[in-house]
Every structure is written in structure tokens, then in C-alpha cells.
Image (tube, rainbow, N blue to C red):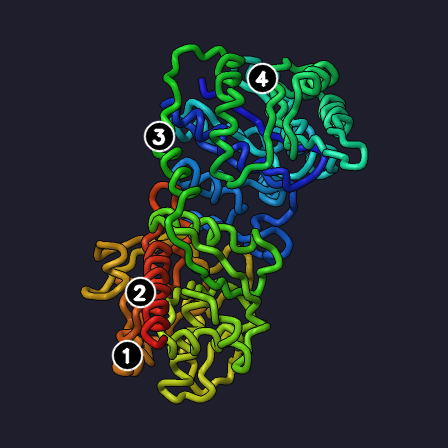
């Protein structure tokens, strides 16, 4: 029977439930067990696709076109698996399903209530992966914080499932905070006690407590927490702030959390965890032999999670190049023709990030003009590619008012235009071109050399596309269309013929980068940045 682990959070948000859930999953996977993770979010949006990144961080996209919570990116990166629509469920989706059933008369005239109808639908979704996939463990992360009113149906559903599944087939891991009061010079356990009390009031006693802390937990503090929270002392797990999120599986292994889980679930036949490749990655991450500065140009840089997958893809690409990529975030609204040279003076490469809307667009275009003219390595993603096309059209093809029709519907040169299949769509949620699509790469191109294959599959999230009416003009002038969707003819990638590394793609390569298999485009950008930095140093020496 599939075993279920439920991960809840208390005291405060942003403690890292997704990282803890991913770390537990990684340790179990490393023991040869079949594991997957799912996220249940308490907000009423059907999915995060219509949420501003400032509200909820990036929107992650799966192969099957699901717009999901960013934690699914952690799941995929840690486990090296692909998730799907079934791995992320929101309150909006739960209620939508229940209301649809009610309209069809499936409840036979019953009054539809939170209990049992909403909780039954939550439980059905929680167990669904176990019925459709062959898993030893399913880890379910509950979004939000215990005590939030919107989380109550999920907590009640877990309470019922724990009773239905039995103590050897389910357990609850509760992530909490042990704050340090510098004035008193003490770690305080009271917030954790109250969090567990709140959980217990709803009928759930956690089996394992994972305690986020800035300082080591003494044996006495662990005993106190265990006594007041009714868990075994060994099940009080210290989760110190880590240098990198990729340290967390090793820290959890040192705390023996996987052993405790297996023992509590009465699983005795398992091998020791095989983490040599993970440990090798960590060793290279912490001991780079060189360093480059990469500018990340975006309009949501105030919130780090808005570009979470890009940040992590840079980590993977750095390790693959035995390098430390220092990411310098620059708000695109701040970039002007008068200051771009100063802003980019110490940068060895540039990535122009995806996004929507007109704000910050001219700054992105100005950035791309500078890197094109000064041979600085460049990677554009989604809107970043569209801006590269607009910049080239204006400044090389001399299409003065060239633009995307998203920004300027009246432009004389709509080099980026709304996709044909999007023109009849009026609703926003889940209606973009989403998910994995095939792309054929041109022989001899930089992008094909990076991928080392001719046909690739990458994930998309966009409504606007390269306007093929201008395709020949761009190719003749030197901005080559080097990636094409063979079915639709959609231009997926462009690159400059006479530039050391100028590649822009309509898809989102960051969603396919993994810990031990860095994405070739991020590796390629960092490799080009290393070369650019060395050439710049050599040039300075020659001038002296």
C-alpha cells in the first residue's frame, strides 16, 4: 500500500515546506523507493496562472501545460522527475469540481457542505496519484500556515485520512520555527508549542517536528519540545539555516529523518541512501575555480521568488562550468541609454527575463541593444526573445516604431503579434500556449551546438509570437531563426550570426534544468561569459 507523508507548517509562512518535502523525498528516493510530491494550496484561484509574481512568486509550468506553484519546480529539480496537473491542487479547483458535480445532480439532492463534500473531494485528490502511479510514498505539502482559516478543510481532510489509512501508512511532518531572541540570548520554543497545540485542536498530532532555527538545538531544548509537543525526542529535527537549499537533504540525512519515517511506517527492507552524485554536485558548488557576474534584467526583481527557476538554473549551469555565477539583479525600468554602460560595466553576461505588460519594456530593449553592439553574451527568454526581435527591427532593420502588438496594437511593424489561435480567446486563466512543444534546431547554430541534438522539447507560456511575415528580413540581416516548431512553423529561437553568444528563445529553458543535468542554454551562457571575461582581461593587459 502506498504510504502518505503530510507536510504542514506553523508559526509563520516561508519557512521552506517545499524544500523540506523535497529533501525528504530525495532521501527516500536515494534509498531506492518510488516517490512523488504534490502541493495543495489554500487560495481560491483555480491555479496561479493569473497571479502577479509579486503575489505568489513565479508561475511554474509542467510538460502537460499546468500552471502551478513554484514548489513544483523544487520537486522536479530535487527528484529529477516531471510533475503534472495532478501534482498541484488549489481550493479553487476543489470547489469548482464540487460545484460542477452539484450542477450535474451527482449529490442526489443533498445539501452540499464543507464536510463531507469538500473534504471528500480533497481526500480524493490526495489519494489520486497513488491510484494512477506506482509509488511507495506520496508526500503532500499543505500550503499556508496552521491556524489560517482557509487551511481548515485541508487539516480536517488530513485528520480523516490519517484515521482511514492507519498509523503505519501515514504520518505528519510539521515544520515550525524556533526563534532566537538576541536581547535574551535564548532560543524560544513557545511559538512551536502553540503551533502544535493549534494543530492538535484540529485532531492532528504531528509525528515529526522539523524546527527551523538559526542556532543549534541543545539536547535539553529538544527534550523540552518533545515533552510539550507529545513527540519522541529523536523526532525533533533540527533544520539550521543552510548555505544552499541543496545542503538541506544532507542536513536532514544527518538528522536521520528518513530513518525515523521508515521506522514509524514499519518499513524494514531498505538500502542505505545513494547520494554520491548529489554530494559531488555540492562539492563543486562550494569550490568553484572561477567567477563571473551575470546581469538578470527583469521587472520583478524585488521578489527573489519571481525568478526562482532562473536563479536555480544559474546554480546548475555554474556547477557545470566549475564556476560561481554572481547574479546581479537590475530592474529594467532603471535602464536608460544614458546609464546602461555604467550599469553593465562589470557584467560578463546578461539574461533578459520573461514577463508580461509594457512596464520596463524599453529598458529591456535598451539592454539588448547594448549587449548586441558590445558583444556581451546574452540569453533572452520568452518576452526577452520578443524584446530582442523588436530591438533588432528598430535599430538594424530601421523599422522605427517596431513593437509587439501586446504593447502597441497600432505599430506599423508588428514583428511580434498575437498567435492566431489566441485571437478568439477572451478569458485569461489557463488559455495561453502552455506546456511542452517540439522544436527543430538549425544545423551549425549555436543553440544546436549547446543542445547537441537536432530536436528538442521545451515548455511554453505565452500568447504572442514572432511574426513570420518578417522572417526573411530578419534572416537576411543576420538575426537567424534557428529554432522552429515543425507543426505550426512558430519561431522558437533566434540568434545573431556575428556575435560570440546571442541566443534568445520563446520557451522557458529554466523549467527543465536539474541539479545533476544543467540546462545547456544556461551552461552555454555561463561558458560564454567566462570566455568574455578572459578576453576582456587579455585586452586590458595588451593596452597596458
Residue at x 35% of width, y 77% of height: 543
Quadrant for the N terminus, please: top left
Judge left or right: residue 172 versus residue 275: right
- C-alpha distance separating marks 3 and 2: 43 Å
Callout 2–callout 4 Cβ contact below 8 Å: no
Q: Gap in Å between the C-alphas at discs 4 and 1?
A: 65 Å
Identify the residue at the far front of this view: 544
Q: Nearer the viewer, mark 4 or mark 1?
A: 1
Front residue (pair 365, 198): 365
Label 2 sits on residue: 488
Q: CA distance from mark 1 to mark 3?
A: 45 Å
Q: Which residue is mark 3?
A: 276
- Is there any visible trace of residue 491 in the rendered image? no
Q: Of helix, strand and loop, which one carries label 3?
A: helix
Which residue position holds label 4? 164
Residue at 29% in and 62% down: 485
Q: Nearer the viewer, mark 3 or mark 4?
A: 3
For marks 2 and 4, the one nearer the N-term is 4
How far is mark 2 from mark 1, CA to CA? Answer: 23 Å
Question: Which element is circle 2 on?
Answer: loop
Looking at the rendering, in which quadrant would you find the C terminus?
A: bottom left
For the residues carrying marks 2 and 1, which lies nearer the camera in this image? Answer: 1
Q: Residue 58: x, y in percent? A: 54, 53
Question: Is residue 131 rendered to the left or right of residue 52?
Answer: left
| Pick the front one: 317 or 436 | 317
Q: Nearer the viewer, mark 1 or mark 3?
A: 3
Q: Is residue 476 visible?
A: yes
Q: Is residue 57 above or below residue 114?
A: below
According to the picture, the residue beneath numbered tag 1 turns out to be: 478
Residue 86 in the image: x percent, y percent?
48, 39
Q: Nearer the viewer, mark 3 or mark 2?
A: 3
Are the two marked residues, 1 and 3, in contact with CB atoms closer than 8 angstroms? no
Amino acid at each position: 500500500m502506498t504510504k502518505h507523508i503530510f507536510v504542514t507548517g506553523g508559526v509563520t509562512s516561508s519557512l521552506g515546506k517545499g524544500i523540506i518535502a523535497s529533501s525528504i523525498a530525495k532521501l527516500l528516493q536515494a534509498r531506492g523507493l518510488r516517490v512523488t510530491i504534490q502541493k495543495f494550496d489554500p487560495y481560491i484561484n483555480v491555479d496561479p496562472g493569473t497571479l502577479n509574481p509579486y503575489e505568489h512568486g513565479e508561475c511554474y509550468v509542467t510538460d502537460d501545460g499546468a500552471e502551478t506553484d513554484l514548489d513544483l519546480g523544487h520537486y522536479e529539480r530535487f527528484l529529477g522527475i516531471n510533475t503534472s496537473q495532478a501534482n498541484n491542487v488549489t481550493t479553487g479547483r476543489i470547489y469548482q469540481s464540487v460545484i460542477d458535480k452539484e450542477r450535474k445532480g451527482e449529490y442526489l439532492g443533498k445539501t452540499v457542505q464543507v464536510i463531507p463534500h469538500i473534504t471528500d473531494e480533497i481526500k480524493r485528490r490526495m489519494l489520486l496519484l497513488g491510484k494512477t502511479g506506482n509509488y511507495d510514498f506520496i508526500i503532500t505539502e499543505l500550503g499556508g500556515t496552521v491556524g489560517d482559516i482557509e487551511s481548515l478543510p485541508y487539516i480536517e481532510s488530513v485528520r480523516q485520512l490519517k484515521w482511514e489509512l492507519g498509523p503505519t501508512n501515514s504520518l505528519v511532518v510539521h515544520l515550525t520555527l524556533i526563534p532566537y531572541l538576541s536581547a535574551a540570548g535564548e532560543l524560544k520554543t513557545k511559538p512551536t508549542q502553540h503551533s502544535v497545540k493549534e494543530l492538535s485542536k484540529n485532531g492532528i498530532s504531528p509525528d515529526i517536528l522539523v524546527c527551523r532555527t538559526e542556532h543549534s538545538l541543545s539536547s535539553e531544548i529538544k527534550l523540552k519540545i518533545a515533552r510539550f509537543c507529545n513527540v519522541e525526542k529523536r523526532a525533533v529535527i533540527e533544520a539550521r539555516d543552510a548555505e544552499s537549499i541543496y545542503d538541506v537533504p544532507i542536513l536532514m540525512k544527518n538528522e536521520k529523518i528518513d530513518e525515523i519515517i521508515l521506522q514509524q511506517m514499519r518499513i524494514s527492507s531498505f538500502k542505505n541512501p545513494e547520494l554520491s552524485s548529489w554530494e559531488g554536485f555540492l562539492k563543486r558548488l562550494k569550490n568553484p575555480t572561477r567567477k563571473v557576474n551575470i546581469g538578470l534584467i527583469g521587472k520583478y526583481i524585488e521578489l527573489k521568488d519571481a525568478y526562482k527557476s532562473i536563479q536555480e538554473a544559474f546554480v546548475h549551469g555554474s556547477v557545470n562550468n566549475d564556476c560561481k555565477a554572481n547574479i546581479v539583479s537590475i530592474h529594467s525600468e532603471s535602464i536608460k541609454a544614458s546609464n546602461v554602460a555604467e550599469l553593465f560595466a562589470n557584467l560578463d553576461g546578461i539574461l533578459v527575463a520573461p514577463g508580461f505588460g509594457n512596464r520596463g519594456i524599453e529598458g529591456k530593449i535598451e539592454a539588448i541593444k547594448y549587449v548586441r553592439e558590445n558583444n556581451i553574451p546574452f540569453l533572452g527568454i520568452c518576452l526577452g526573445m520578443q524584446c530582442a526581435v523588436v530591438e533588432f527591427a528598430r535599430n538594424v532593420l530601421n523599422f522605427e516604431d517596431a513593437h509587439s502588438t501586446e504593447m502597441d496594437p497600432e505599430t506599423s511593424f508588428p514583428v511580434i503579434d498575437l498567435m492566431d489561435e489566441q485571437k478568439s480567446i477572451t478569458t485569461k486563466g489557463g488559455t495561453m500556449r502552455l506546456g511542452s512543444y517540439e522544436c527543430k534546431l538549425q544545423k551549425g547554430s549555436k543553440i544546436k551546438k549547446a543542445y547537441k541534438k537536432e530536436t528538442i522539447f521545451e515548455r511554453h507560456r505565452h500568447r504572442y509570437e514572432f511574426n513570420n511575415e518578417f522572417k526573411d528580413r530578419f534572416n537576411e540581416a543576420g538575426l537567424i531563426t534557428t529554432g522552429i516548431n515543425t507543426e505550426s512553423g512558430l519561431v522558437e529561437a533566434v540568434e545573431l550570426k556575428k556575435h560570440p553568444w546571442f541566443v534568445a528563445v520563446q520557451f522557458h529553458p529554466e523549467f527543465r534544468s536539474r541539479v545533476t543535468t544543467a540546462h545547456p542554454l544556461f551552461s552555454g551562457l555561463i561558458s560564454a561569459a567566462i570566455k568574455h571575461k578572459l578576453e576582456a582581461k587579455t585586452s586590458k593587459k595588451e593596452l597596458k
